Amino acid sequence: MKITKVELFVLKSSGLYNNPEGAEEASGPTYMGLVKVSTDAGICGYSDVETCASVAKAAIEAPKWSSEPGMECFDGLASLLIGENPLEVERLWYRMYRGSIYYGRRGVAIQAISAIDIALWDIAGKFYGQPIHILLGAKWRDRVRAYASTLFRSTPEAMREAVHKYKDEGFTAIKFGWGVFGKDRELDVRLVEAARAALGDKNDLLVDTGWFVERTAKEAIQVVRSLEPYRPFFIEELLHPEDYDGYRKVADSVDTLIACGEQEATEWGFQQLIHRGGVDIVQPDLTRCGGFTVGRKIAQMAELSNILVIPHSWSSDLLTAASLHFNAFLRRAVFIEFNTSQGPLSRELVKNSLRIEDGFVRVPEGPGLGVEVDEDVIERYRIA
Ligand code: MG
């Protein structure tokens, strides 16, 4: 089997991203990159990627730079893959990373590589007739507890209403993120207090403070201490993603679990976050960290350091499916992040959208990612 084509479709949902303060729900991705890798065996693999999709498309379609084997370093990602065996995921990952190294390593390049890597694992699963978690080597569980991933509301009343809405949908854990959070310390505490009161003692409350609000490590420690009475399961992204020393200070100073990693990429980046940052929970996003090939290395590093892995997974049901396979493979899994946005690119990309049952989501059973991409939806939203 050989790779014949690597494509990225730029999809656009509607207007530009717009989330006024107090919005009920994030509007979902405005633009999305949808990667499709085709083979001469008729098997195709897919992945979405949350990035600047038009730049990722350019990185994939850029021409070949070198004709000398081993000298690839400014090369378009597709040119590095055409004619290769898609089952060699590890070698092809490094071939893409090495072959784009002078313009890549992080950002769009690693995000495009991530999506291609997921698509290659999808192909491998379809080729072997096995779901990806079996190829990774473990099915520790057939369902994963979900947390509703939503935005902070702007008043305690609205927080309570939101909690009741998600509880009615079956969620037993809810994460409120950024939005109004961080602008008024006293209001922040009242919002979290209201959420905890409405959730009751048995359900879990998670907080994403968002690093867009600049904080020093000591200010972050004060934020954590002010929320500790409401027992958040974790507090996410208190600091700029590159402030590893700040994360170390915070994690060493408080009892609450400190989470970070949705912006982090590659095994080298996660090595820094784990060993220098000292966080309690890493949150790799499979479409940003380097795909399954890097994800399984992160899982091993986290296991050796005895910290948790709770993948970031927001964009679409396609990424949620990928993250469910990753969660099935983790020896200890805690949550699948479940995006509650009703944006069309979040909800319509796969034919049977994923559902919550008693607060859990089932791990897909079919070959590869185990979900079917709706090609009609690609055509409907495609702009490039
Ligand atoms: Mg976040």
Image (cartoon, helix red, strand yellow):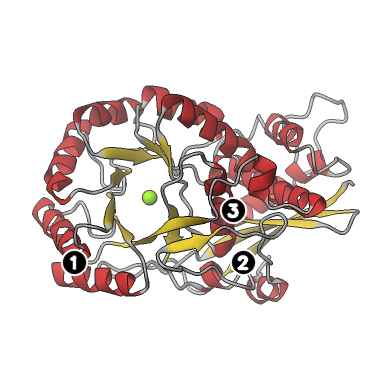
Q: Position of residue 172 (x, y in %)?
A: 33, 62
User: How many numbered markers are drawn?
Assistant: 3
Amino acid carrying mark 3 in the image: Ala
Q: Sequence order check: which comes first, mark 1 or mark 2?
A: 2
Q: Is mark 2 on a helix, strand or loop?
A: strand
Tell me if 358 is positioned left or right of 322 in this view: left
Q: CB of mark 1 within 8 Å of CB of mark 2?
A: no
Is label 1 or label 3 in front? Answer: 1
Q: Position of residue 5 (x, y in %)?
A: 83, 53
Q: Can residue 305 be seen in this view?
A: yes
Tell me the SS state at disc 1.
Answer: helix
Residue labelled with disc 1: 198
Q: Earlier in the sequence, mark 1 or mark 3?
A: 1
Q: Specify whether residue 239 is in view.
A: no
Q: How far apart are marks 1 and 2 (CA)?
A: 38 Å
Q: What residue type is labelled 1?
A: Ala
Residue 359 lies in what quarter of the image? bottom left
Q: Is residue 216 left or right of residue 57?
A: left
Q: Distance between the residues labelled 2 and 3?
A: 19 Å
- Name the residue nearer the viewer: 105 or 361: 361
Location of residue 82 by image quarter: top right
**Which residue occupies the foreground of this view, 343 or 232?**
232
Compared with 220, 376 (above or below) is below
The secondary element bearing badge 3 is classed as helix
Residue receiving disc 3:
322
Q: Does the residue labelled 2 lie within 8 Å of ligand 1?
A: no
**Residue 272 horizontal/vertical position (percent):** 44, 25
The residue that mark 2 highlights is 11
In the picture, measured across the screen, residue 322 lies left or right of residue 233, that is: right
